[in-house]
Image (cartoon, helix red, strand yellow):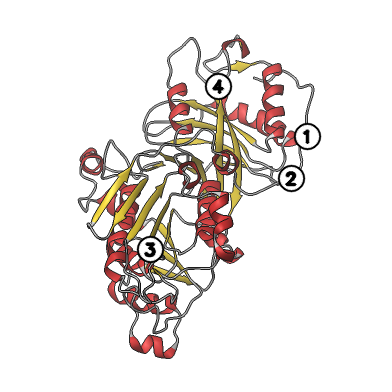
Amino acid sequence: MNNLQIRIPKGVGQRLFKEVIRHGPREPVVFGLVTHASTATKEIVLVRDIRIPPEDAYLPSLGHGARWSGRYMIDLLNEATATRCGLLIFHFHGGSAVRMSSDDSESARQLLPKFQVIVPNRPHGSVVLGTHSVAGAILLPRTDRLETAFSMRQFDKRILDWPMPIASKKERQLFERQPLVRGRLTAAAISASRVAVVGQSGGGTHVSLQLAQHGFGEIWGVDDDYVDQGNRFSGIGFGEKDAAAGKRKVTVLRRAISRIAPRVRYVGLKARVPEQVAIDALKQADVIVGCVNNLHARADLQEIASRYCIPYVDIGLILPTDQASPEEFPPVRAISGNIFTYVPGDVCMWCTGFLSEEKLAGETLGRGRPYLQTKHGADAHVLSFNGVLASQAVNDVVNLVVGYVGETGPIAYRKYDGFKGSLIPCDVKRSEKCMMCSRNSAAGDAIWGTRIISQLSTVA
């Protein structure tokens, strides 16, 4: 099965690699607590957290591998059942093309079916990590076949995929040092990416068309609305005839993208979040861009991104007016916007207070809002302001895929001031007390049922 992928959130991956490459008296082993998700095209194994065995958990071993006690294994499996997680065993061989040793393969054949008996509804596996590659065996729920063809995705300053495409040393150096140059690895990374854009009006039109021009392989536009005389001026690509004919926004954008980038596949979904068809589509995306106009939709997108380890870029724009003014048309007092870029495992919208239960409760029935906040809800000239936010959002998507920023990585939160024409980075950090991160990060599809065990033979 080559449509199987392991995903590791930021932070978890760094701790994992630090431990498995550690030099010591034995080969280091790390256990991953994992969930999973199924999509129409892929099975995804999500690493929620890792467990590093203490020294007293190891047993003497005659071979090059590691053995650990049955007591430690019992505790680990009880934690797995209590948290509704499967187990992955990680270790490191090094090299650019790793493979499982005969000892690794035999150990997987013995251990993984035992794990499955105890936690049947989650995947289990044994994974060997290399410098640019990954190998191993995964036992998915409801099957007894070990899958050995899979990839791994780690989130750090950019999306890191193993195995990396075969490339020369010069091609790798070009990709690592100058990723914006149209080299083979950069083109391959962009063309292989699927980006879902939620909201195909305003900023969403800019985002979709720019992604197409960059050459992203697939763009999935999610919007159930039609073009009309009121919304056709907020974005680009909508014509007067489209409004007169009442065409769907996704239909118009599909036509535009097929003209400017015929090799790009645009899929228009006539749906809105949180409808199931939209959620099923978003689970298949490599990156999600949200161009929505209410906090409830943002909360839904943030949860999907967290649960399935998908980077999420959000943009928003508002023109508040002086509500205390007695004038019929009070002056605009600000042109305010935001860009929030979420990397799985890092700071989320709930960490920063951008989303909160109080804000959701204060939003009127989850309805969208017009850009211009007046009692008339009038349309405004916002196309160019949307364009600024959308262009930076596309920059962030490109950076997530190829990592052109380098050591600093993506900026999580920026505020936009349309009066000054400035995007101001805000210093935000992941909150260890964030209940939404704790609940949703790499949570995968929901399952039910647990089984606690009290005895198990010594496992090696």
Residue 243 picture quarter: bottom left
Image coordinates for residue 430, horizontal then vertical, percent: 45, 37
Query: Image point 61% across, 64% down: which residue?
Result: 276
- The numbered dot on residue 448 is 2
- Quote the CA–CA distance across marks 3 and 4: 47 Å
- Say whether residue 99 is visible: no
**Front residue of 186 and 410:** 410
Q: Split into 4 quadrants, where in the image is the C terminus? A: top right
Image coordinates for residue 149, horizontal then vertical, percent: 51, 44
Q: Amino acid at mark 4?
A: Ile
Residue 404 picture quarter: top left
- Quote the CA–CA distance across marks 1 and 2: 11 Å
- The numbered dot on residue 52 is 4
Say which residue label 3 marks.
318
Image coordinates for residue 266, horizontal then vertical, percent: 41, 69
- The numbered dot on residue 451 is 1
Q: Amino acid at mark 3?
A: Ile
